[in-house]
Structures are given as C-alpha cells and as structure tokens.
Image: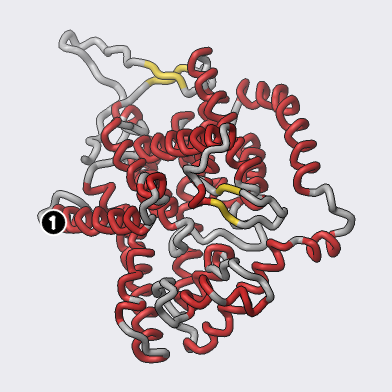
Amino acid sequence: MTDIPVPQSATGPSGRRRSQPSETDGQGTNRPATPSRRSLSLGATPLRTGFIALLLCLWEGVPFTLIGMPNLLGLQLFAVIIVVGVGFFAYMALNGLKKFTIWEGLALLLLGVCVFSSIAYSIFIKPQPIAAWAIAVYTVSPLLTIMVLRGLNCRIGDALEAIYWTGFIGSLFLLITATFNLNFLDYYIRGSGLGTEARVVFFKLEATFGLIIAMMKLVQTDRPKAMAGHLIVVAVVAYNVFAASESRLAIFAVLAALALAWLFILRGNRKFLVALLAPFAILPLVFYLAGRYLSNFTTLDDYLARDVSAGWRNFTIQYFRTYFEESHGLGFGFMSANPIYNNVLAFGSNRASALYGVQNYTVGLDDIGLYAAFFQYGYLGVSLVFAMTLMAIVTLFKTRKLGSAFFPVAAIGLLMFTFLLSPIPMNYFTLFYTAHMGGILWFVAAEAAAALERSPRRQNKKGYLA
C-alpha cells in the first residue's frame, strides 16, 4: 500500500488550524506526528509472527527431531511452503497486486547461480545421478523467503518478534533440558573445540539475533513490567549464546555489535544511562569469558596451535578447495550428503574426517562461512552473497534515522556486520546453517528500504511535503 503525501498543516471545518497529535522519539522529546511518519511503524500481528516463527522452527528440525523423527521432514515442509508461497506471490505480481523489486530480483538471481553451478558440475564436470544432487535444491530455498513473506503482507515487526520469541523459547527449552539432564535435544549435540563432551547447539542464531533485539528493547523501555520481561529474555538467550553454544565468533559479534549500537544508535539520556550501568554487567561477563575460553592462552601462536576448531576449519577449507579447482571457477554446487552417494558433500560429511585421523567428525561447509559460497557457487556466487550482505547491512543501519522504534532493526544490521569481522566471515544466504536466518534478514532489509523510501526526510527531498 502506497502512502499518499499530505501537507503538514491541516485545517478543520472552521478554517482554524488543527493541532496535530504528538509522538515521542524514545528519548523523551515530543514531535509532531504526520500521517507519513505514523506509517513508519514496525507492525506485528500474532498470526504472521507465528508463521515466520514456524519457518524458523521447521528449518531447525522442530518439532520432528524432538519426537525422534528425521529433521529432513522439517526441511522438506519448509521447502513446500516456500514453493507454494512463491507461486502465490508470482500470481499477485502478475496481476499488479505486488511489486517485484530489486530485492526479490537479487534473491532470484542468486538462486539461479546456485542452480547453474550445480548443473554444470554434477552433469558436465563430474557427472552423478540426478537424485544425488537435484533434490538438494531445498538447501537454498530460504533465498525466496522474501517473496513468501511479502505475499502474505508480513512486516518488519513480525520478523523481529519471531526471532525474539523463537530465540527465547528455544533457549529456555535448552536451559530446562540441561538443568534436568533431559535427552530431548540429543540430536543437536555437536563436537567442541574446547573439549566439551555434550555441547548442544539449538536455535543458536535465533538466540544471537534475539539477544541484540532484546537488549535494544530493554534499554528503550520505561515501563518496569516490560523491563523485567525483557531482562528475563536477555538472561535466557545470553545463556544460549555465552555458555551453551560455546561459539566464540558469535560472542565476539554480539559484544562488538552492542558496543557499536551504543556508539551510533543510542542517543541522549539512554546512552548516558547505559554507560553508567553497563560496567556492572560487562565486567563479570569478561571475567567469565576469559576464564572459560582463554584459560590456556599464552601467546597467539600457541593459542592457535592448540585451538582444535581453528585447525579443523583449515582442514575443511583445504578439502573443499581441491574440488573447487576442478570446477573452472563455477563451484561444485549443492548436492545430497546422504552416505549412499559418492560425491563431495557425502564423502565430507561421512568419511573425510578419517583422512585426518579423526573419526565421526564432519568436514562440512557450515564451518567455513563465505569460503563455502566461493567453493560451492564460484566467483559469481560469492560476489552476489557479499554484495547482498553489504546491501542488507547498510540498509538496516540507515533505519536508525527513522526513530527509536527502528533501533532494533539498525542493531541487527550492526550484528550482521560484526559477524563479517571474524577470520571466517558469515555467509547468510547459501549455507544450510544460516540460510533460514539470512532469508528473514533479507526480507527485513527489503522492508527497511521501503520504510526509508516512505520517510518524511525522503519525501521532503522529493518535494512531497510542504
């Protein structure tokens, strides 16, 4: 729906100028509310929020894995929903009910590159049965999430609330199972570079992005009841991010994003208050993290030599680089990791670790971020992934100009950025581990671009407002 620009000065039937309603900018300052400004709300409805949360859960394998069923059922159902939703969006676009933008176009282009690389490698370069690779197209189906959500008129608030609540509920379930030593999450047990025997990785990305959303909500609210609720959410998802998942990359990204949010997003009294209170939370956290993750640190070279996780990533990169060199720069594409097949991913997932004297450890693309986009989809694929990532980051960060309601949106843009600062930069769009979140973030960025286009400042530049 397009906003109709209206003059800021309006008069009533008597010819006298009506006083306009005012709104707060989140820092205690009242300002006039124009119709165009009021339209720049995040918006959220329980039904649409629940739908986005369902997509996130299905990609994580929930509820199927919790009752002993294969996680593949969740992935297949996710893909079916995407196909149906894309068909619905296409119908609406063809009938002029929806606009096809550059955001849908880039997502579709990247999907096309992924398919092209897969066909080139698995049919012409290293032929294999079609069943061994074609069905794995579902791994990049989240790229088209934007079409599904726009077809259903979802809004930014729906996506943020879905991330917030799935991160919280998933982390709460993880906390309960760990406290009472329950085995519902055995499927999610993963190896650890720190030697932890039963590290459970469950809704880690949702918790990570949910944490920064919850923190922004916490520092903005003035209501004690809401503050207490957000504080509980922060504590629970922080347990997932800082203690359960043992992901040093995620921990660094969150802390760096929070610091940047304080510098560039928070304003006025809020910024001063956070500066006063933050040391009481940060200092205990620093001591905890130093004791847990850096206890064996002497020198950087020594630490890297002892770090199993970093060493394994190097092995993984070298393994996939060999196969990439056979692809003439196109990448080897997607394919099934089912052990019944003999291909790059199946061998890596099920048997390659034996080459390095390790048993039952996966040589997987999920550990190598943007390198995976390069090896799988070649120069064109990694260029598109990187360009889309920067486009999303810049757009999300710009929304800080739209008022405090958009501060969580700008903050997740900063978190996307800080995830790129690690030795293994994040790949949001073509990895199984991150694709579901990347699809949601791409949708949020597209809606953020539309909100920026509708903003009063933008309309003033175009001459719409008096």
Which residue is found at the position 44% from the left and 54% from the top?
Answer: 438
Q: Quadrant of residue 361?
A: bottom right
Residue 20 visible at all:
yes
Depth order, front residue of 88/76: 76
Crowding near the residue tagged with mark 1, few <14, some 14–19, many ≥20 C-alpha atoms within 10 Å = some
Residue 400 visible at all:
no
Q: Position of residue 253 (x, y in %)?
A: 63, 48
Depth order, front residue of 24/234: 234
Q: Position of residue 162 (x, y in %)?
A: 39, 38
Which residue is found at the position 49% from the left and 35% from the top?
Answer: 173
Q: Position of residue 2 (x, y in %)?
A: 23, 41
From this viewpoint, which residue is outermost toward the left? Answer: 95
Residue 283 position (above or below residue 2): above
Q: Amino acid at mark 1?
A: Tyr
Which residue is found at the position 70% from the left and 23% from the top?
Answer: 277
From this viewpoint, which residue is outermost toward the right? Answer: 298
Identify the colour scheme used: secondary structure
Residue marked by disc 1: 91
Quadrant in the picture for the C terminus: top left
- Secondary element type, mark 1: helix
Q: Quadrant of residue 244?
A: top right
Which residue is found at the position 26% from the left and 56% from the top?
Answer: 82
Quadrant in the picture for the N terminus: top left
Q: Position of residue 219 (x, y in %)?
A: 57, 25
Depth order, front residue of 199/253: 199
Residue 300 position (above or below residue 399): below
